């Protein structure tokens, strides 16, 4: 990826500082790919570079690993960026703006819209970023975590921040397959080509149900009948039934009605 391509993308780059294990670099790359991030910078990887374990742990995010840029220090890694965010769980004795991942993501989108290049810096597995490295950054990102167990590994941290960045621009939920496209948004999903039941479908079901309940003697009190019917109708209308579900329910009613009307064997006949 060239600098001009990165400028056009508006996506934040990920900088991993002195990562110890190739596996952690690979899983961080996989987390990046989950949220459409592609630009990876690595500062002083402990086990050298390239790293076969990083490739194998990337679970398909091979391009991110192969195109990663290697740097000898953080100063070199951030030269081309206008705004850099440092991720850390520990309080720092310096005057620095602190944001949650969600707040930082909104800030990133605003700045990218103005043409700024953005990077997010992640520290070492054991103790994160040091104060000198954080001093090079503009903003600290700290997640709301249990203060008694605040450590997050590299891939989890990349996943958390990447998710918040991607969430406002995501066009769908989950994955798509050859059989079904990715879900377009949250809410009730109706299977296949089936639509929701319309009012005609629903009123036909109500009429069927109420007729059979009447025949079975369910409405024992004429005075209470209207209120009982309203309760039944409200109950089923809250569910947002599909056309198929209406057909199933009417089939259940018909089956129960046939059973109710079928002559039953006496105990003596059943014994024979």
Image (cartoon, rainbow, N blue to C red):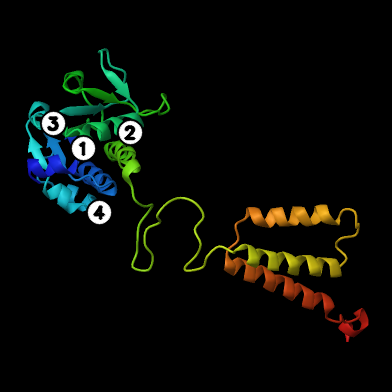
Q: Earlier in the sequence, mark 3 or mark 1?
A: 1
Q: Earlier in the sequence, mark 2 or mark 3?
A: 3
Relative to residue 207, is residue 30 drawn left or right?
left
- Mark whose residue sits in front, 4 or 1: 1
Residue 88 location, quadrant = top left
Q: Earlier in the sequence, mark 1 or mark 2?
A: 1
Q: Above or below — where is 247 with respect to 40?
A: below
Kindly identify the residue that appears in the image at 91 percent across and 81 percent down: 266
Q: Looking at the figure, which quarter contains the C terminus?
A: bottom right
Residue 69 location, quadrant = top left
What residue does disc 2 label?
Answer: 152
Kindly identify the residue that appears in the image at 66 percent across and 64 percent down: 202
Q: Which mark is residue 59?
A: 4
Q: Which mark is residue 158?
A: none
Q: Where's residue 148, x and y in %?
A: 42, 24
Query: The residue tagged with tag 2: helix, strand or loop?
Result: loop
What residue does disc 1 label?
Answer: 12
Cα separation between marks 1 and 2: 20 Å
Cα separation between marks 4 and 3: 28 Å
Q: Above or below — where is 49 with respect to 235?
A: above
What residue does disc 3 label?
Answer: 81
Q: Residues within 10 Å of mark 3 (few under 14, many from 20)?
A: some
Q: Residues within 10 Å of mark 2 (few under 14, many from 20)?
A: some
**CB under 8 Å between discs 1 and 2:** no
- Residue closer to the observer: 108 or 223: 223
Q: Earlier in the sequence, mark 4 or mark 2?
A: 4
- Residue closer to the observer: 19 or 245: 245
């Amino acid at each position: 990826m060239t600098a001009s391509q990165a400028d056009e993308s508006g996506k934040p780059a990920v900088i991993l500082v002195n990562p110890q294990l190739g596996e952690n670099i690979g899983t961080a790359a996989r987390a990046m790919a989950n949220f459409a991030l592609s630009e990876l910078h690595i500062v002083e990887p402990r086990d050298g570079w390239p790293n076969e374990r990083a490739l194998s742990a990337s679970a398909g995010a091979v391009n991110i690993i192969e195109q990663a840029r290697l740097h000898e220090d953080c100063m070199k890694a951030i030269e081309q960026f206008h705004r850099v965010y440092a991720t850390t769980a520990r309080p720092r004795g310096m005057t620095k703006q602190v944001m949650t991942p969600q707040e930082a993501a909104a800030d990133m989108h605003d700045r990218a819209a103005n043409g700024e290049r953005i990077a997010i810096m992640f520290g070492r597995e054991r103790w994160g970023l040091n104060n000198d490295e954080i001093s090079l950054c503009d903003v600290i990102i700290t997640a709301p975590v249990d203060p008694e167990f605040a450590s997050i590994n590299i891939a989890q941290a990349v996943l958390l921040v990447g998710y918040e960045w991607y969430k406002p621009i995501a066009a769908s939920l989950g994955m798509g397959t050859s059989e079904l496209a990715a879900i377009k948004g949250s809410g009730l999903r109706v299977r296949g080509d089936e639509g929701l039941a319309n009012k005609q479908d629903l009123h036909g079901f109500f009429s069927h149900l109420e007729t059979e309940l009447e025949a079975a003697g369910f409405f024992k009190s004429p005075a209470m009948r209207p209120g009982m019917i309203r309760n039944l109708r409200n109950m089923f209308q809250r569910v947002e039934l599909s056309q198929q579900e209406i057909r199933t329910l009417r089939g259940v009613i018909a089956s129960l009605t046939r059973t109710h009307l079928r002559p039953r064997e006496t105990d003596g006949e059943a014994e024979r």
